[in-house]
Image: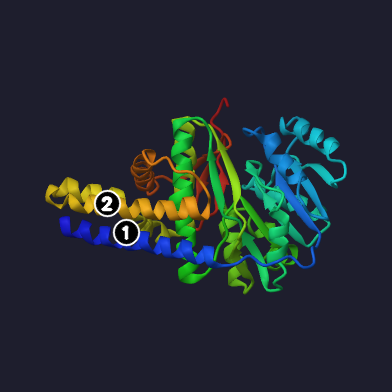
């Protein structure tokens, strides 16, 4: 058992070293200059109040860009986000904007339905689809437009810096996003190129979305962002990891909500990329080193070596690429926490999303389950 774990640990250490190389290669790419800005449509699906929602949305109104519009979508007029949107629209009347009321979604993925309605109303070919918990600087659209000067580019996915809320569980989740999640994207980019996209902010050509079957093709997938990029890459369209880093404000949360969110994430990933999900074991060097020491205490020096490599990889990805601060004391706790959720992701085929329960299928699709009697 000790030697099996050592082999797995060696693979995980190699992966950590690869993540450092991948991060440095990403940083070596010089973003293109913007020559001729084209008009852009920003699509914002909304559902309820996120922490800091007004500041998040205002950052999109304040773009340093000559021609853009913003479209918002809510299910009903009673959505608490509506007054905030209306106030911002009055505050920034020079920016063309619309608020769409879509009604209840006929699709399992309600976000996809909102995006479909907004895309139909959008005026421009280049669109930026961004979640409500995203905050950006005024340079987002300039960076995106510069990258899409490449005629072969179809989809660009923005890396994101997770900004935690005040709770302990929120801080843990932010550390995982800023180290492990981004490292996985960078390594995949280096080894095979971008064959997928990741939310919460994606830019794409309308004509590319239409060419891959439109949002109708994505409506049954939980990880619609991943398959959007996959379908585009499979069809021969360029997919890149953008040079622009956004802020993902994940807000505060308790253990119950964190567990539901992370189980949704892990179960969805297992069905979107089953082999890749198993391979995530190699992204967890510190838990593997702890297992080695638990089985055979004589191998304790590997824990120190592993910890050193892990800290260097976390610094390179989080601090150098994302410009995010790291709580070094919480990093080992999050590593063990992530390992436990990874194990839990192998079990169960249901998730809870925005108060509704869904069943996941093996191909990444999902469906809404009926509410129990009395609810």
Q: Position of residue 160 (x, y in %)?
A: 56, 50
Q: Position of residue 222 (x, y in %)?
A: 56, 50
Dot 2 crowding, Cα within 10 Å, few <14, some 14–19, many 20+: many
Can I make out residue 59 in this image? Answer: yes
Residue 348 located left or right of residue 209: left
Element class at badge 2: helix
Can I make out residue 362 in this image? Answer: no
Residue extending furthest right?
A: 94
Residue 142: quarter of image: bottom right
All told, the count of numbered labels is 2
Element class at badge 1: helix
Q: Quadrant of the N terminus?
A: bottom left
Residue extending furthest top?
A: 374
Looking at the image, which is closer to me, 84 or 1? Answer: 84
Q: Position of residue 85 (x, y in %)?
A: 77, 36
Looking at the image, which is closer to me, 349 or 288? Answer: 288
- For residue 312, above or below residue 207: above
Residue 247 located left or right of residue 253: right
Residue 52 located left or right of residue 124: left
Residue displayed at 45% across by 58% down = 184
The label on residue 12 is 1
Residue 93: quarter of image: top right
Circle 2 is placed at which residue position?
288
Q: Position of residue 76 (x, y in %)?
A: 75, 35
- For residue 285, above or below residue 28: above
Residue displayed at 50% across by 58% down = 363
Q: Earlier in the sequence, mark 1 or mark 2?
A: 1
């Amino acid at each position: 058992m000790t030697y099996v774990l050592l082999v797995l640990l060696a693979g995980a250490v190699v992966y950590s070293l690869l993540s450092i190389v991948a991060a440095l290669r990403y940083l070596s790419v010089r973003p293109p200059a913007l020559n001729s800005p084209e008009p852009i449509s920003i699509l914002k699906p909304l559902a309820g109040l996120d922490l800091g929602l007004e500041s998040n949305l205002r950052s999109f109104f304040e773009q340093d860009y000559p021609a853009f519009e913003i479209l918002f979508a809510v299910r009903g007029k009673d959505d608490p986000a509506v007054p905030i949107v209306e106030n911002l629209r009055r505050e920034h009347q020079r920016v063309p904007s619309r608020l769409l009321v879509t009604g209840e979604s006929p699709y399992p993925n309600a976000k996809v339905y909102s995006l479909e309605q907004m895309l139909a109303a959008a005026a421009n070919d280049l669109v930026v689809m961004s979640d409500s918990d995203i905050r950006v600087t005024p340079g987002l659209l300039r960076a995106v437009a510069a990258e899409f000067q490449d005629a072969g580019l179809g989809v660009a996915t923005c890396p994101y810096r997770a900004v935690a809320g005040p709770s302990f569980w929120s801080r843990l989740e932010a550390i995982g996003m800023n180290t492990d999640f981004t490292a996985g994207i960078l390594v995949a980019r280096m080894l095979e190129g971008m064959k997928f996209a990741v939310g919460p902010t994606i830019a794409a050509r309308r004509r590319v979305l239409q060419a891959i079957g439109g949002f109708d093709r994505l409506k049954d997938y939980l990880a619609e962002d991943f398959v959007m990029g996959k379908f585009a890459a499979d069809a021969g369209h360029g997919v890149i990891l953008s040079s622009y880093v956004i802020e993902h404000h994940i807000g505060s949360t308790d253990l119950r909500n964190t567990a539901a969110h992370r189980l949704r994430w892990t179960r969805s990933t297992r069905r979107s990329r089953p082999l890749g999900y198993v391979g995530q074991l190699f992204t967890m060097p510190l838990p593997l080193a702890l297992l080695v020491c638990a089985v055979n205490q004589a191998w304790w020096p590997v824990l120190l070596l592993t910890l050193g490599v892990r800290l260097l990889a976390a610094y390179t990805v989080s601090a150098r690429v994302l410009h995010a601060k790291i709580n070094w004391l919480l990093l080992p706790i999050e590593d063990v926490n992530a390992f436990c959720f990874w194990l839990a992701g192998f079990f169960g085929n249901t998730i809870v999303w925005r108060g509704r329960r869904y069943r996941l299928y093996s191909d990444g699709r999902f469906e809404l389950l009926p509410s129990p009697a009395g609810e």
